[in-house]
Image (tube, helix red, strand yellow):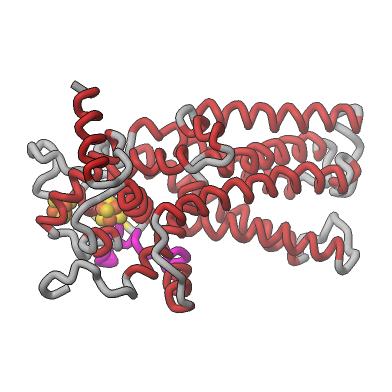
């Protein structure tokens, strides 16, 4: 039966001159046909106005709309055709299943796309490797993980150039892999050149996480029909915490190479202040997101992706907790141990950036930019009030 379904989808796609849809893509296309007739949710998020610009949903449309969806749950809780109705419309869940297919299909190099399918194991192995690498390295370089106090001098354990070389290569590869994925996403259906206004709108919507307000400002649905802004707030803590930690590393790099001021920096210095604020944000946000994730309505999202979602949250939390612990006890005799643990978790995060949940940020910003460009163009359908 499944084979017949697949053959039928292929025949329809070929007749329409398009690429055959997978079962998950066909399910999104089916549900969007229902939504396009109903249009009750038009005011909720960008997905619905983007949907009404289309009558048919090919592969590129399905992936674009799936990544434009922020999984806020509003259209599921508002839907009169949601399960147990026979139409079984559950847009956030169908979109979530397709999103992981986007990440996997567009992964670079392509062979590593398989890492999304067993993402819990991927994160566990990367974390194990990262921790083992730095614990063994500290033992080899220092002779022991415990030592006489080193006045917070990390480079007395791991030489500066060794850390720059290791993290530079891994981070550079992660940026390249994510950029290749975003390029593939853009090329599937390019909306044309981006104006300054479109870029500004997409960046603002991403920074504000606009579509986690449910379209009415009261927030998402999470455990039930009630709206909550907590998901947006926890995301903001996480997002800005991550950016502040990144800024701390950037400023420390400038201090080192431009001002020739070398670590350890005092507690009141800019890199330490930025890193501390970022670490606190990156601790509060993931704790909140994990709490929401554990009590999420069972019809939301794709249950098969829970290891990826929770594993990523746990990895962020491990980064912030070990980073703050390192700052608190950097003058003590266990600094080498704390540093090795922190760097092990950071390395695991960098290794898995292009092959885990982090990818959603890249594809969502790309989808928001596509939407900001597209909505400035005349609607090709030219239907009635359109
Ligand atoms: S999700 Fe349901 S209520 Fe909303 S537009 Fe689609 S069919 Fe209509
Ligand atoms: S779940 Fe939220 S963001 Fe996704 S399509 Fe529905 S209303 Fe839009």
Where residue 80 sits: x, y (%)? 9, 49
Asked whether residue 313 is in view, the answer is: no
Residue 362 inside the magenta-drawn segment: no
Q: Nearer the viewer, residue 60 or 79?
A: 60
Asked whether residue 298 is in view, the answer is: yes
Q: Nearer the viewer, residue 83 or 322?
A: 83
Where residue 364 sits: x, y (%)? 43, 55
Image quadrant of ligand 2 equals: bottom left
Considering every residue shown, the one lying at the far bottom of the view is 197
Q: Is 34 left or right of 158, judged from the image as shown?
A: left
Residue 6 sits above or below residue 345 on the image? above
- Magenta highlight range: 205-222
Q: Is 72 left or right of 137, judged from the image as shown?
A: left
Residue in the image at 52% along x and 46% along y: 358
Residue 78 sits above or below residue 207 on the image? above
Residue 215 inside the magenta-drawn segment: yes
Q: Is 324 left or right of 151, judged from the image as shown?
A: left
């Amino acid at each position: 039966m499944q084979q017949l379904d697949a053959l039928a989808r292929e025949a329809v796609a070929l007749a329409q001159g398009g690429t055959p849809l997978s079962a998950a893509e066909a399910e999104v296309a089916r549900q969007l046909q229902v939504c396009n007739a109903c249009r009750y949710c038009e005011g909720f998020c960008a997905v619905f106005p983007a949907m009404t610009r289309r009558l048919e949903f090919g592969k590129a449309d399905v992936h674009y709309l799936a990544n434009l969806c922020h999984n806020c749950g509003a259209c599921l809780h508002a839907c009169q055709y949601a399960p147990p109705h026979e139409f079984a419309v559950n847009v956030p869940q169908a979109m979530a299943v397709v999103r992981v297919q986007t990440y996997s299909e567009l992964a670079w190099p392509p062979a590593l796309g398989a890492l999304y399918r067993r993402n819990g194991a991927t994160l566990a192995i990367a974390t194990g490797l990262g921790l083992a690498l730095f614990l063994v390295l500290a033992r080899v370089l220092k002779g022991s993980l415990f030592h006489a106090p080193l006045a917070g001098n990390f480079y007395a354990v791991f030489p500066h150039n060794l850390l720059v070389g290791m993290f530079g290569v891994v981070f550079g590869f992660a940026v390249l892999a994510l950029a290749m994925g975003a390029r593939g996403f853009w090329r599937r259906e390019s909306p044309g050149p981006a104006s300054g206004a479109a870029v500004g709108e997409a960046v603002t919507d991403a920074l504000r996480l606009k579509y986690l307000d449910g379209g009415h400002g009261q927030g998402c649905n999470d455990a039930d029909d009630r709206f909550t802004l907590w998901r947006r707030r926890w995301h903001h803590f996480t997002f800005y915490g991550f950016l502040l930690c990144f800024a701390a590393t950037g400023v420390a790099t400038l201090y080192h190479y431009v001002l020739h001021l070398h670590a350890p920096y005092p507690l009141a210095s800019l890199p330490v202040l930025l890193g501390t604020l970022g670490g606190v944000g990156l601790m509060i946000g993931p704790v909140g997101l994990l709490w929401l994730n554990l009590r999420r309505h069972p019809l939301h999202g794709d249950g098969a992706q829970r290891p990826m979602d929770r594993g990523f949250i746990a990895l962020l939390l491990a980064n912030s907790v070990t980073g703050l612990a390192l700052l608190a006890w950097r003058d003590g005799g266990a600094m080498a141990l704390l540093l090795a643990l922190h760097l092990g978790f950071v390395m695991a995060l960098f290794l898995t950036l292009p092959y885990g949940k982090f990818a959603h940020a890249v594809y969502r910003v790309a989808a928001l930019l596509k939407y900001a460009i597209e909505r400035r163009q005349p609607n090709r359908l030219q239907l009635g009030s359109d």
